Image (tube, grey):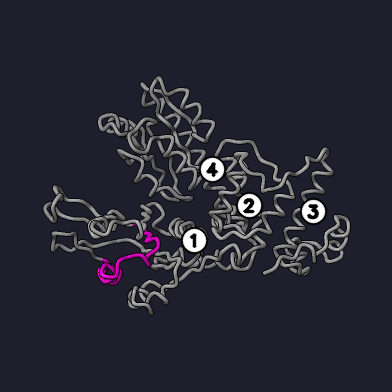
Amino acid sequence: MNEAKILLVDDEEELRRSTAQALELSGFSVETFSSGDHVLELIGYSFPGVVVSDIRMPGMDGMTLMQKIREIDQEVPVILVTGHGDVQLAVKAMREGAYDFIEKPFTPEMLAGVIRRAMERRGLVLENRLLKAVAGKRDDIEARLPGRTQVMVDLRYRIRAIGASDADTLIVGETGAGKEVVARALHDISARASRPFIAINCAALPANLIESELFGHEAGAFPGAVRPRYGKFEHGRGGTILLDEIGSMPFDLQAKFLRVLQERVISRLGSNEVVPLDVRFIATSKVDLEAEVAAGRFRADLLYRLNVATLHVPSLSQRRADVPLLFLQLVREAAARYGRDEVAVPPEVISDIAQRDWPGNVRELRNAADRLVLGLDNGGRQAEEATGLAERVAEFERGIIASALVAHGGSLRPVYESLGISRKTLYEKMQKYGLDKRMLTTES
């Protein structure tokens, strides 16, 4: 396991420095930040530490930082430091998933005690995850990329095989299919897991600043460059660089990036000095890059250099059998994220979810789960509330079978195999619940 570490976030330099020194004297390894932006680059499922953040900061405040951390891993302990007037806000943060809060002024011993308990909890979480993986049970990769269809089983196998290497990787898939989730998984199971994960949206970088953003610049390199600045590549510091939608990278910049890939060096704008680069590159694309090469919009040599290892993330239309169970998991995650009680999803809603098309893939399905948890949507159907346990169980079972029939287009064999029951049992339950495969078959 990586060394346990405290990520300390506070915009007040003097308080940040004194707190870090006190914690280091207590035996902790501390890394300090003036804002939360770079903290997210170090958070992952394998992150072995604790985040301590001031709750009031310009830009991204402590509450927002905590929410973003929980989107990556809900079990990373976040300790919020509050002023006297922020106690009610801190209590609200506790309800939304903060590990603890500590009020200013505080003694170093008080903060150290809270951190030690948080460290013990994080250590137990990581140890439990490791034991499950060794025992062949559901591990972090399966938790982040769930699915029983063969395409998802194959994808997880390839992630585990490629992730342990240091190979640059191309991830291809439709919008919302989970390409960045795959990229983070590759980073988190690699030897670079404790170093930054930096996501760069190639489509969002301003054309006149893109080289400065990626390569950095020296003072005076162009009007307005009053001081030297590290680029995002150099900021990688031994970690992973994600180039999201690399097909949007300007053609003239692709040649410079190819040199970086081949030689692992960069030169800041305005400098002739060569800076060695120790990073792993992962690129994503929603477009067919071979077609972009044929159209003259993407360099063939860059594509060949990138696709040494290629992962294809399936769309939901390619794994329809996963939709019902995936939706239920997203509902549970949304309930935890919003601090709500567990939501019982009516079987009629599950059946409706399974039959619908999801052009936005997992992202769109997650939005539907969020709306359900927040009470904004009931899947377009109003389910009658069952009065007893037996009725609830029967409705749930009927919904699962109906969803499986829809997902498999009415073909019975994959239905009873995926549900782990015999053909005879499936027939009996279909008769019991009045299910007709012809009625439940959707047109392709």
Residue 242 is covered by the magenta coloring: yes
Single out the residue that lies furthest toward the bottom: 294
Q: Residues within 10 Å of mark 1 (few under 14, many from 20)?
A: some
- Bounds of the magenta segment: 239-264
**Real-space Cα distance between discs 1 and 4?**
36 Å
Q: Is residue 108 above or below residue 379?
A: above
Is 283 placed left or right of 234 in the picture? right
Q: Position of residue 388 (x, y in %)?
A: 83, 39
Name the residue carrying label 1.
Answer: 175
Nearest to viewer (mark 3 / mark 1): 1
* CA neighbours of label 2 inside 10 A, class few (<14), some (14 to 19), many (20+): many
130 versus 69 height, above or below: below
Percent position of residue 431, x then y = 88, 59
Residue 334 placement: quadrant: top right
Q: Which mark is residue 124?
A: 4
Q: Is residue 117 or residue 252 the one in the foreground?
A: 252
